[in-house]
Image (cartoon, grey):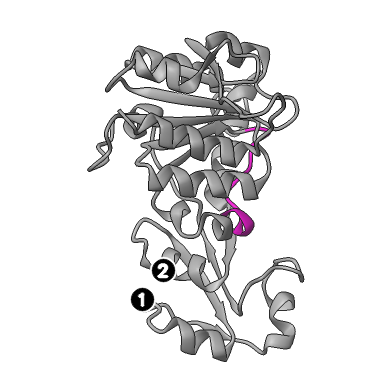
């Protein structure tokens, strides 16, 4: 049926896509804490919208990169900006747009100076922002090209994630993809070996890495408890475990990521 205002009605999927695009364009996040705010201000790729500081934080922060801050009383800080009262904000918060890192191929093929081999971390439904923030920090330290995760059921950019990442969120690509399985298949087509970390692995991570010197690696980790989904696990070229000294061992996912990244850089 034709629309009387001219032309045929758009299909529902087109309308939904346009709405999602507008919602993404309107999305903003609040980062808090002196370190996170300072790093966001120093990042030219960040769209910065509003800077709120206490007088003490403004004195400690120093240069704001030309952005005029709003100075507020510490007693009403969390009433001025939409962050939780218990947030360790240090009197500093900035409203920004989420970072846009580009496509999976753009981040996978970027050069990281000094990195011994191409490395990517894939996270399957790791939703705790503190875990993801810690993983981003380790990924930056060990020269990973990106951390990727599904857009749904994973931690989005938040102030808590940025604070745990200790600046890495501004520099380490964190790419949330529509479909993790499709992203893993694309990485394999680009030459990455997919190594899943799971307690059921027959081989240990060092054993498998010893046979892959210099090869591009994607380390795949699942959420604590459920681990990787069956589809994700089935796509891995190797499923490995981290060896423990005792009969029983359990690691937080961010610790497992740090150990695995270190091991992957020891060619």
Answer with left or right where residue 183 lies relative to residue 28. Answer: left
- Which numbered circle lies on residue 260? none
Q: Quadrant of the N terminus?
A: top right
Vertical placement of residue 168 versus 58, above or below: above
Check whether the beta carbons of the residues at disc 1 and disc 2 lie within 8 A of each other.
Answer: yes
The residue closer to the viewer here, 183 or 220, is 220
- Which numbered circle lies on residue 65? 1
The residue closer to the viewer here, 201 or 124, is 201
Question: Along the polypeptide, which appears first: circle 1 or circle 2?
Answer: 2
Residue highlighted by disc 2:
41
At numbered mark 1, what does the secondary structure look like: helix, strand or loop?
Answer: loop
Residue 9 covered by magenta stretch: no
Q: CA distance from mark 1 to mark 2?
A: 6 Å
Vertical placement of residue 216 versus 166, above or below: above
The residue closer to the viewer here, 266 or 233, is 266
Answer with left or right where residue 236 lies relative to residue 82. Answer: left
Give coordinates of residue 48: x percent, y percent: 46, 65
Vertical placement of residue 25 versus 206, above or below: below
The residue closer to the viewer here, 53 or 114, is 114
Q: Which segment did they paint magenta?
A: 152-161
Residue displayed at 74% across by 87% down? 75
Picture quadrant where residue 207 is located: top left
Give coordinates of residue 77: x percent, y percent: 69, 80
Residue displayed at 66% across by 12% down? 230
- For label 2, the crowd category at 10 Å Cα-Cα, with few meaning under 14, some 14 to 19 and many 20 or more, is many
Can residue 4 be spotted in the picture?
no
Q: Quadrant of the C terminus?
A: top left
Residue 158 covered by magenta stretch: yes
């Amino acid at each position: 049926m034709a629309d009387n205002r001219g032309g045929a009605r758009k299909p529902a999927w087109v309308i939904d896509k346009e709405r999602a695009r507008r919602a993404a364009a309107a999305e903003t996040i609040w980062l808090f804490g002196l370190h996170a705010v300072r790093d966001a201000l120093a990042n030219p790729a960040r769209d910065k919208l509003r800077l709120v500081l206490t007088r003490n934080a403004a004195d400690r922060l120093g240069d704001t990169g030309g952005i005029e801050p709003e100075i507020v009383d510490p007693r009403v800080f969390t009433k001025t900006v939409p962050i939780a009262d218990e947030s360790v904000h240090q009197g500093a918060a900035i409203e920004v747009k989420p970072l846009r890192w580009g496509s999976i191929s753009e981040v996978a093929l970027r050069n990281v100076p000094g990195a011994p081999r191409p490395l990517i971390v894939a996270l399957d439904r790791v939703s705790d922002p503190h875990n993801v923030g810690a993983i981003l920090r380790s990924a930056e330290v060990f020269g990973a090209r990106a951390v990727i995760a599904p857009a749904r059921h994973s931690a989005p950019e938040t102030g808590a994630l940025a604070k745990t990442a200790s600046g890495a969120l501004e520099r380490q690509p964190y790419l949330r993809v529509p479909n993790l399985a499709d992203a893993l298949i694309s990485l394999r087509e680009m030459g990455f070996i997919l190594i899943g970390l799971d307690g059921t692995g027959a081989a240990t991570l060092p054993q498998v890495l010893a046979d892959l010197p210099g090869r591009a690696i994607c380390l795949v980790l699942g959420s604590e408890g459920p681990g990787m989904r069956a589809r994700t696990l089935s796509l891995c070229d190797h499923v490995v475990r981290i060896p423990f000294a005792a009969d029983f061992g359990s690691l937080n996912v961010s610790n497992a990521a740090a150990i695995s990244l270190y091991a992957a850089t020891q060619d």
